[in-house]
Structures are given as C-alpha cells and as structure tokens.
Image (spheres, rainbow, N blue to C red):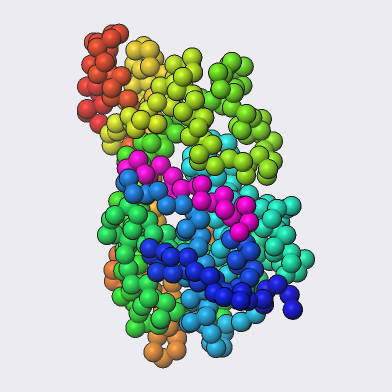
Amino acid sequence: MNDSSIKLSEEKVFKDPVHGYVHVRDKLIWDLIGTKEFQRLRRIKQLGTTYLTFHGAEHSRFSHSLGVYEIVRQIIDEVFEGQPDWNGSERILSLCAALLHDLGHGPFSHSFEKVFDLDHEQFTKKIILEDTEVNRVLRAVSPDFPQRVAEVISKTYHDKLVVSLISSQIDADRMDYLQRDAYFTGVSYGHFDMQRIMRVMRPKEDHVVFKSSGMHAVEDYIMSRYQMYWQVYFHPVTRSAEVILTKILQRVKALFHAGYPFKKEPHHFQSLFEGNVTLDDYLKLDEPVILYYFHMWEEEEDQILRDLCRRFMDRHLFKYVEFDPAEQYRALRELEDLFRKAGIDPEYYLAVDSSSDLPYDFYRPGEEEERLPIHLLMPNGELSELSRESTIVQAISGKRRTDHKLYYPEDLLLDESGNLELKQTILSILRKF
C-alpha cells in the first residue's frame, strides 16, 4: 500500500467560514498541510494590500488553498464518483494539485514579482520538485508523483480534465477566491450558487461541462467574477497602496546598487537585488518579514525611502485621477518636468497604473492565448458553448475592459513650503484630467 491510499484513523476537519468545514481523510493531504512550506502560506495574505481598503481582508493563501482543495474533494467524491469519463485513479493527484496550486506565492505577490522579475508558478514547481518537506511527502507516493503534481499545476499534464478542475474559466480556484474574498471584504458581489454549479457539473472527455439546466447559475458566477474584479480587485485605493509598495521596493533596490549605507541592511533582499535568489532565500520571505523592514526603514536617512515606508505603514496613500494614455501623454511629460522643478522625484511620486480584465471569452482560431470555453451539455447530449445559449454572457464575451489611473501625492502639493506657485500649477493640470 503506497501513501496515496492510506486513510487517517479519524477524519480531520477545519472550520471554514465559506464551506462550513474542510474535510481531510487522506493521510497524504494531512501530511502536506503540516509541511513548513504549506504553513508559510498562513503568512501570505490572499489579497495583498486590499486590507488597506477593506479592513476585513486579512485572510491568507493558506485558507484559500484549503478551500480549493475542499471544492475539488466535493466535486470528485460527490459529483464525479461513478461517472464514465472520470478516472478515479486521478483522485489523489487532483487533491494534491488543488491544495498546492498557490504554494509559490511570495509576499504581496504581484508587486513583488513585478519589481524582481519573479514568477510564483516557477517557485511553486521548485517547492514541489526540489529538496523540501513537500517534495518528501509527495515522493512517498512514488518517485514521479511530484512531477505529476507539478504538471497539473503548470497545465501540462496529459489528463486535461484533471487540469481543468483548478485551471479553467470556471474552476475550484476561482469558485473559492470569489466567495472567500467577498466574505472577508464584506461585499455582496462575489456570491453565487456554488452548490447548484457543482450539481450540474459533468466530466466529459478532457474537460468539465455543465448541464444546460444550470446555465443561470453559471451566468451568475460570470457576473460575480466581473463585479469582484472592478469593485474589489481593481479598487483604486488598493492600487494606490500597490503603487507605493512597488516604489518602496524599487527605491530599496536602487539604493542597494548605489552602495547606500542602510541603518537596517536589507539582508533578506540581497539575493533578489543580485538576481540569484535561491529557493531557500525565497521561502524566508513572507509578509511579516517585509513589514518589519518597512517599519525599520521609516527611520532611514534617505528621504524618499523613509517617506514611502511611512505612507505605506500609516496608510497615507496617493490620490488619483483618471488617465487616458492616448490623449494625455503630453500632459504627463509636462507633469514630470514640473515635479522635478518642485523638488518631487516623479520616478517615485508620479505613477500610471493600469488594470484590465476579460470576464469571459472563448478560443478564437489564430489567437495566441488559448481560452478554453465553458460548454453546456444540452438535453440531446450535444455540447454548446456558453455564449451561444446565454444572451447575458454573449454581451460581455471577448470585451476587455481597461482602466488607467494617475497617482500622485496630493499632500506634498498642498504643503505650503517650497514653490507654491509651481505646486498650484501642477494641481491645476491634475484637476483637468
């Protein structure tokens, strides 16, 4: 008997605000949860800087990962069991991939990745495949089992049905984070009838399809996702915090390379600055570590780093105006010059941030990006792509919405020190945006 089939003597449960309980009977899953790499996810917020906008958004990638696992467990054990197109031998692989899919996320993940040119998916693979506690637990199943888990997460596994459970336009990952993020931010947008969606799921060859009788529940999910992106994930205040966070990391990196004598040396960042970060270095970074450094850097001699850290820690964020890059790029160049004349470095205090989302689309021949459509299983047994049957989804299919905002420190421009006339000129230009 290999470790994949061993059951715990007693079922373990986690009380969960979204799913009620997360159930664990497989020893392999319980052992993975107990690894230090998985426990690290308790110290990584699911929504990064969103807690500065919605104060309840303090939940972790640990709780989200458990939620994705629980959804996949319910689908496999309660919906797919006995279905002709489901290969039951892939059960434990699917559960492991669901549990570990976010394992490589770093602190304030997306800002962190952008500054240091990192890819959390590559670190997820490294944690699974290299010398870690997670790898040792997975290898107890078989020598090739870690590789199979990594392939599911990277969407290269041969059984595309298994991949689609955690990577598709309607998957366990999205179904958990929409509901979980809605719960902890206190908004109503992300709620949809997940139980109904799961009841109408069916395994069909290499992907999941949905009985046409459940189309309206799927429509509700699509619209919930659309609303969550624009009301929560792309909230302009959250984006302001991300801009400042990004600028802090950029400033520290620039100071390090310039030989600046830090009062608090950025030891945990050194390999990142030098471009040779190891897995061990990466795993030592979590959000409490980052915030500790920010707190220490509030006392640095460098005025820009000190100010940016105080802004982030005390929530003194940048203001914003709507920005049209096609029409207003000349005004932006003028503002950059005026900022320099006013003694305010535009590299750190003037930033354009863009958000873009495609709520639903389907594969179009000739396009590079593959989009697997959502298919409905019609009463006659044929499959029909969702937007062909739903006028609501048809109306938003393929329609990408993009939003640009220009962020700036209004308080510095309202301060009465320095060239007041120049600052008033800057403010008058910003008010015309």
275 shown above or below 209: above
Q: Which residues are magenta?
A: 34-53
* Residue at image coords 46%, 48%: 45
Q: Would residue 44 be counted in the magenta stretch?
A: yes
Q: Residue furthest right?
A: 143
**Residue 36 pos. (x, y %):** 62, 52
Of the 4 image quadrants, the one containing the N terminus is bottom right
* Residue at image coords 40%, 69%: 20
Left or right of 268? Residue 312 is left
**What secondary structure is the stretch in magenta mostly built from?**
helix
* Residue at image coords 68%, 52%: 126
Q: Which is nearer the eye, 27 or 163?
A: 27
Q: Which is nearer the eye, 41 or 246?
A: 41
**Residue 224 pos. (x, y %):** 32, 62
Q: Quadrant of residue 241?
A: top left
424 shown above or below 235: above
Residue 329 in view here: no
Q: Residue furthest bottom?
A: 380
Left or right of 186? Residue 357 is right
Q: Would residue 52 be counted in the magenta stretch?
A: yes
Q: Quadrant of residue 358?
A: bottom left
Left or right of 8? Residue 245 is left
422 shown above or below 295: above
**Residue 115 pos. (x, y %):** 53, 35
Of the 4 image quadrants, the one containing the C terminus is top left
**Residue 272 pos. (x, y %):** 62, 34
Residue 279 in view here: yes
Q: Quadrant of residue 285?
A: top right
